[in-house]
Amino acid sequence: MTFSPKQEEAMLLLKNGELRRLNIFEGSVRSGKTYVSMIMWAFWTAQSPKEKAYLMCGKTLTTLKRNVLEPLKALLGDSFDYSVSKKEGTLFGRKIYLEGAANAEAESKIRGMTLMGAYCDELTLFGEDYFVMLLSRLSEYGAKLFATTNPDNPSHWVKRRYLDNKNIDLLSIKFSLEDNVFLPAEYVKSLKNEFRGVFYDRYILGKWVAAEGRVYESFSLDNIIARAELKERLSENKLITAAIGVDYGGNGSASAFVLIGIDAGFRNLYVLSEYYDKRNRSAENLIKNFEAFTLDSKSKIPPLQTAYCDSAEQLLIKSFRQAVGKYGVEVKNALKKPINTRINMLNRLIAAKRFYVAEDCVHVIEALQNAVWDERQLHKDVRLDNGTSNIDSLDALEYAFERYENRLFGF
Ligand SMILES: Nc1ncnc2c1ncn2[C@@H]1O[C@H](COP(=O)(O)OP(=O)(O)OP(=O)(O)O)[C@@H](O)[C@H]1O
Ligand SMILES: [Mg+2]
């Protein structure tokens, strides 16, 4: 194994017995945190008591597998075995439990454990309650925690209660993108171009900063496309999937449908058409308009197969299903991924010039231009939703594309 100089420094801490009870590897994306921390975790575990219990957890078991278990297996071969379905493994002969931290029962799963060690992947995505429980389970003498994270809001509990807390036996090891000498220069350059504003500061510079100003800072005229040009582009590179996102209006908000398409190779995301109605006359009216929008969309964009709806209104979803099933369009609940995951996805596509809105989708355009972070809640990364900007079109847009995160970002 070869290490970057920064990783060598971290390895020395292990060798010299300078690790603390909590060891947090923080910093930029792709900076080599996971790589070195999982090796340190493995070596530390190998030197620790054999009969004790160890835990590895990620936001979900799927992300843990992708980010840590698979790469660790590739490095260690026979010294590491695991089964995600059994939620356990063995690492240098030690028993390892595997858990996802995101689901509702996560906390109860670790409630009874007594742990010698724990490894946490992407700590800021964990719930604080889970982490507090986890620390209380790390009760063996000499127990240690290893965790990786990217920076988030400076008021995030990880920063406020742990990293900034002088009374905790904690070591923070900071990594920047430049520390990873294994990345090709071209890749680093394109990565830097993908992030803007607050996300640049966090994911490239590795700083804990609050979000201010426009949410979609780099959305510009370049992302707005004339119908004729759109037609030409789509004849060269055909759409392979399309979906409608639906957000319903309640008091004071509008109903919005947004049709999106994604072209071959999951390269570009297009907003193809929209429906926006602030009047919200009646449910019947909405169902009728949804049917008309779906029929029109399906006739123009045949790959359209699914509409993703705000799951809050199951009765409406049922009616929608009845209305459009005959056109071969399925109606499903929106995933509703965390808002900042959706915002970050779109911002990456915008910055990489992979996102285009048809010129006549004026509500989506206006919504993207006007969305701002809520200045009164700077500690929380909240998109302002006080009726002055159109959040409904943004929600509908996000419901339509959020499912494709893995394919859009190539993992
Ligand atoms: N010492 C090394 N030798 C070979 N490859 C390495 C080394 N360190 C890191 N890499 C590779 O660099 C890439 C990024 O490293 P890693 O996944 O550890 O970054 P990270 O800081 O955890 O990033 P993120 O915040 O995006 O999770 C990975 O593909 C990893 O395999
Ligand atoms: Mg990582």
Image (spheres, grey):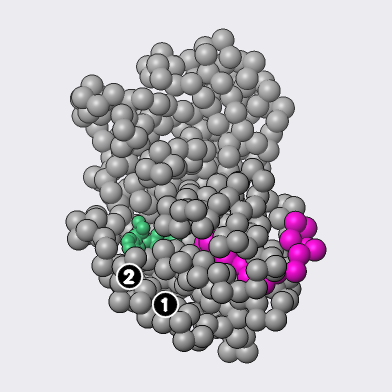
Q: Residue at x 28, y 49 (%)?
A: 352
Which quarter of the picture shows residue 308?
top right
Which quarter of the picture shows residue 182?
bottom left
Query: Helix, strand or loop at disc 1?
Result: helix
Residue 382 visible in the displayed image: no
Nearest the camera: 217 or 250? 217
Nearest the camera: 281 or 109? 109
Instruction: Tell me where residue 305 appears, x and y as whole percent.
Output: 48, 21
Query: Helix, strand or loop at disc 2?
Result: loop
Q: Is residue 188 magenta?
A: no
- Ligand 1 within 8 Å of disc 2? The answer is yes
Q: Amino acid at mark 2?
A: Phe
Residue stretch in magenta? 108-126
Quadrant of the displayed image that contains ligand 2: bottom left
On screen, residue 175 versus residue 186, left or right, reads right
On screen, residue 15 versus residue 105, left or right, reads left
**Quadrant, the N terminus:** bottom left
Distance from label 2 to label 1 (Cα)?
Answer: 9 Å
For marks 2 and 1 on the same chain, the one whose residue lies earlier in the sequence:
2
Q: Would you call the spot at circle 1 few (<14 residues within 10 Å), some (14-19), or many (20 or more)?
A: some
Q: Residue at x 51, y 85 (%)?
A: 17
On screen, residue 42 versus residue 362, left or right, reads right
Q: Would you call the spot at circle 2 few (<14 residues within 10 Å), some (14-19), or many (20 or more)?
A: some
Nearest the camera: 100 or 124? 100
Extreme residue in the right direction: 112
Point out which mark residue 3 bears: 2
The residue tagged 1 is 11
Badges 2 and 1: C-beta atoms under 8 Å apart? Answer: yes
Instruction: Tell me where residue 358 appears, x and y as whole percent.
Output: 32, 33
Q: Residue at x 21, y 24 (%)?
A: 236
Q: Residue at x 60, y 46 (%)?
A: 83
- Image: 313 above or below 369: above
